[in-house]
Image (cartoon, rainbow, N blue to C red):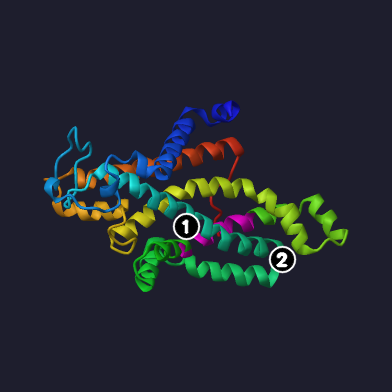
Amino acid sequence: MKKLLQRLGWPGTLALAIVLLFVLVALFAPWIAPYPVQGAGGPNVVAKLSPPSAEYWLGTDHLGRDILSRIAYGTRVSLTNGMLIVAFSLLIGLPIGLAAGYFGGWVDEALMRGTDVFLAFPALLLAVLMAAALGPGFLNSVIAVAVTWWPWYARLARSEVLVLRGQPYVEAAQLSGVSHWRIILRHILPATGRPLTVQAALDVGPALLTAAALSFLGLGVLPPTADWGQMVDAGRKFFPARWWYSAMPGLTIFVIALAFSVLGDALRERKGGTARASA
């Protein structure tokens, strides 16, 4: 562990600490939140739009709910969103990239041209269109963003496989009569894990931001479930007089997205990972 922290350097270590802090907040939100009932959506109209104070450290929203408690509960939704988006994207993109890079020929051509169709659309616009078609909701927002994210993993996996399939140990396995899928699973897939892991760490932050953008547009989770993007949207109606309503969840989004980005950069430098592959 000590060697890992040394290799990450102080920026990466700080980013890792921030990410772990948010994970702990997500896991223990009902016990960490000062007002768990309000964090879960219970109103407190007597204290609506109260500024930050000793009682409400980050102020309250238009229903009198403690914003700190809402942010703590929203951490569950936002982190789960970002991680599920990356996980679903890997599940779709990785097999496509492995098959395209290993088999080549018409398989590669067909899979990559299909991938290019998704890459032709701006990612956020396609996510908004998908979310609008599916309707608001947690799972729908994850699917909508994952549909726009998987082509990058397919491209990255393909580029790694194109290098690996010419390695002597892969050619030896082929000459020995080992099946193609066994070669992919035992020899090629493990070697692609390093750059894909680095890219996944880099992508959690942007995925989280995209999911927050959908919530801001009313295409994410539905109230009273706490969500950072939804809180920013609700608070903009009272900005700038009640600046804390939007500023606090917005600052939270900025911090966690930046932490994942810095952590991903540190992992890339440590492991020699590669950035997203180009077409």
Nearer to me, 139 or 202: 139
| Rendered view: 38 above or below 12 | below
Label for residue 190?
none
Q: Residue at x 83, y 56 (%)?
A: 173
| Prevalent SS, magenta region | helix
Going by the numbered disc 2, the residue's amino acid type is Phe
- How many numbered discs, if any? 2
Query: Which image quarter is the N terminus in?
Result: top right
Residue 73 is a magenta residue = no
- Quadrant including the C terminus: bottom right
Q: Which residues are magenta?
A: 147-159
Residue located at (35% from left, 44% from top): 30
Q: Residue at x 62, y 56 (%)?
A: 157
Q: Quadrant of residue 15?
A: top left
Amino acid under disc 1: Ile
Q: Vertically, is 75 above or below 125?
A: above
Q: Which residue is mark 2?
A: 103
> Is residue 238 shown left or right of residue 272?
left
Residue 252 can be seen in this image: yes
Q: Are marks 1 and 2 in contact (CB under 8 Å)?
A: no
Name the residue that disc number 1 marks: 85
Q: How many neighbours does mark 2 have within 10 angstroms: few (below 14), some (14-19), or many (20 or more)?
A: some
